Amino acid sequence: MRTKASFIGLGITCALLAAPAAAWADASAWTFAGGGALMLKEGTEELTPRGAMSFDVGMGTNPDGKFILGGLFRFTSVFGLGPDAALMVRAATHGFQASRFGAALDVGYFQRLWGSYSRGITGSLTIGFPLGFSLSVHGIYATNDTMGFGAIAGIDFLRLTVYRQVLLDVWPNPSPAHKIPPAEARLTGPWARF
């Protein structure tokens, strides 16, 4: 019994000594909804314009870094045909995450959930504007001679609310996710905090 108590005491002591003095686990996150037009081709078909609605959900590293790395799930509904799904890696600038001007690059795996159920690679370049507005250019290349490209515009609701670092004088952000003031993050902030 005494040996068991000693091991418990030793474990608690080690845990307290290993704990950092100050730590936080802030993470970046994205929740986007938007619509646009895509040019799609499957098999021997010609490129055909289609309307689409896209939804993104993801999370990444600390929003105070100059660059943010993360993962993203994208669900795109192609009107009249069906849904496409993608699992992607995102690299974004601090300006993108803080809802100022910035950019994000997404690359990953693509799965078509209709037609010939093609799979392959997809990518997008997103330009972020103040208040969470975004404009992105998408591209896909997949099996069964599937390819496509297009543009989607919309809004990221988390960049509009929690991560917003613009218009703070007229619209305060009561619970910002950023620990570093916007000016410091841009000039002297860390490269990427995990």
Image (spheres, grey):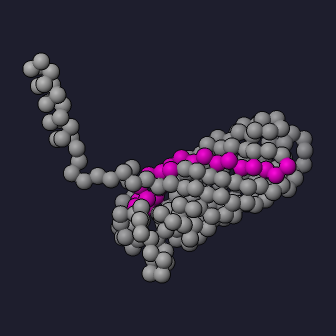
> Quadrant of the rendered structure where residue 31 is?
bottom right
Q: Nearer the viewer, residue 121 or 160?
A: 160
Magenta-tinted stretch: 59-80
Residue 79 forms part of the magenta stretch: yes
Looking at the image, which residue is at 81% across and 57% down?
A: 51
Q: Is residue 74 above or below residue 96?
A: above
Looking at the image, which residue is at 56% across and 72% down?
A: 130
Q: Is residue 25 above or below residue 145?
A: below
Residue 66 forms part of the magenta stretch: yes
Q: Nearer the viewer, residue 76 or 157?
A: 157
Q: Position of residue 88 (x, y in %)?
A: 59, 45
Dominant SS type (magenta): strand
* Residue 27 visible in the picture: yes
Q: Is residue 168 above or below residue 138?
A: below
Q: Position of residue 6 (x, y in %)?
A: 11, 25
Q: Is residue 121 above or below residue 189?
A: above
Q: The N terminus is located in which quarter?
A: top left
Q: Position of residue 57 (x, y in %)?
A: 58, 50
Looking at the image, which residue is at 67% across and 63% down?
A: 154
Q: Nearer the viewer, residue 69 or 172?
A: 172
Apparent side of residue 186 relative to residue 153 in the rendered image (left or right): left
State the residue lying farthest toward the left: 2
> Quadrant of the rendered structure where residue 124 is?
bottom right
Apparent side of residue 41 relative to residue 2 in the rendered image (left or right): right
